Amino acid sequence: MSNTLANNKPRLDLEQANQYLQGATAPAIVQWAMNHFGERLILTSSFGAQSALMLHLVTQVAPNIPVVFIDTGYLFPETYRFAQELT
């Protein structure tokens, strides 16, 4: 079995990652993800109740992270306004 992915990126050692991330603070987890995934890392959001907190937390560590809006098609008009305000 190959030790690399198709794009020649090293495989993630899940045991080591779990040991490092267990009990880590939220900013430390985001920093770890940025260090390991770099520009491939994105943040998804449906702009629900906890979205502002998560967006704030992640952008404090990764201010240029792309945010992908998950529109389920069942969102309230207030949700769209909230997303627009946060944007």
Image (cartoon, grey):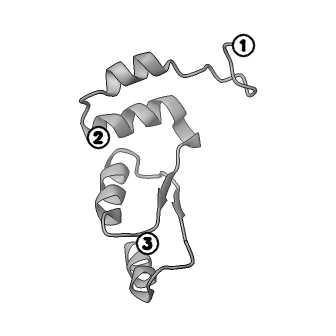
Q: Residue at x 24, y 36 (%)?
A: 25
Would you say the residues marked 2 and 3 are in contact, meaning their CB atoms lie under 8 Å apart? no
Residue kind at label 2, given as amino acid type: Pro
Q: CA distance from mark 3 to mark 1?
A: 42 Å
Pointer 2 or 3: first along the chain: 2
Within-10-Å neighbours for mark 3: few <14, some 14–19, many 20+: few
User: Which percent across, then down, holds residue 83?
Assistant: 43, 75
Circles 1, 2 touching at the beta carbon (< 8 Å) = no
| Marker disc for residue 27 | 2
**Which residue is at a point 47% across and 52% down the rendered structure image?**
64
86 versus 10 height, above or below: below
Rounded to the nearest whole Å, what is the CA distance between mark 2 and mark 3? 21 Å
Mark 1 or mark 2, whichever is nearer to me: 1
Q: Which mark is residue 2?
A: 1
Give the distance between the C-alpha atoms of the residues marked 1 and 2, in whole angstroms. 32 Å
Q: Which residue is mark 3?
A: 87
Which of pointers 3 and 1 lies earlier in the amino acid sequence? 1
Discs 3/1, front: 1
Residue 3 in the image, given as x and y percentages of width and height: 66, 13
The C terminus: image quadrant: bottom left
> In which quadrant of the rendered view does residue 55 lie?
bottom left
